[in-house]
Image (cartoon, grey):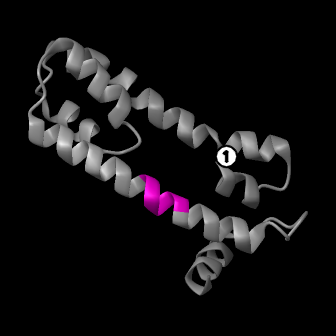
Amino acid sequence: MAGIGAISTTQQEGQQLSTIFTLSAVVPLWASSLIIMNPGHVVGRVLTLIPMTAPVTVMIRLGLSEIPAWELAVSIGLLILACLGLLVVASRVFRAFLLMYGKRPGLQEIVKSMREA
């Protein structure tokens, strides 16, 4: 969220960009009927391994059946790696664009500054 705030020029723009996080939490709820019918379905397993959807999916699946220990371990490991990676990316974006008040950076400029930082 800090990285989104750093590249946003206005509060409204930041709120619009933050819907990415909200939508990723809603995806498991869209697939919940499929997961409830068959907790071991491929869709449930894939959503368990994607870090943005894993917390909600794991709670749905744990309420219905057991999840293999390896899936939980991989899911937690990927979630930790994603948190650390996104923290590094957000810190680089925050450092590069915090002082660019009023100017919205383009995607190429964001990628370029992250490589340099």
Indicate yes or no whether the magenta region holds residue 40: no
* Residue span colored magenta: 83-87
Q: Is residue 84 above or below residue 44?
A: below
Indicate yes or no whether the magenta region holds residue 85: yes
Say which quarter of the image contains residue 66. top left
Judging by the rendered image, the residue that carries numbered circle 1 is 17
- Quadrant for the C terminus in the image: bottom right
Graded by Cα atoms within 10 Å as few (under 14), some (14 to 19) or many (20 or more), the crowding at tag 1 reads some
Q: Residue at x 80, y 65 (%)?
A: 104
Outermost residue to the right:
102
Q: Amino acid at mark 1?
A: Leu
Q: Is residue 5 above or below residue 59?
A: below
Q: Is residue 12 left or right of residue 87?
A: right
Say which quarter of the image contains residue 116. bottom right
Outermost residue to the bottom:
116
Q: Position of residue 3 (x, y in %)?
A: 66, 57
Q: Mainly helix, strand or loop, the magenta region?
A: helix
Q: Position of residue 34 (x, y in %)?
A: 22, 20
Q: State the residue in front, 91 or 49.
A: 91
Q: Position of residue 92 (x, y in %)?
A: 63, 71
Is residue 105 visible to the viewer in this orientation of the structure?
no
Q: Is residue 5 left or right of residue 116?
A: right
Q: State the residue in front, 16 or 63.
A: 63
Is residue 47 visible to the viewer in this orientation of the structure?
yes
Q: Residue at x 68, y 52 (%)?
A: 2
Say which quarter of the image contains residue 72. top left
- Give the number of callouts: 1
Q: Is residue 22 left or right of residue 107?
A: left
Q: Residue at x 45, y 62 (%)?
A: 85
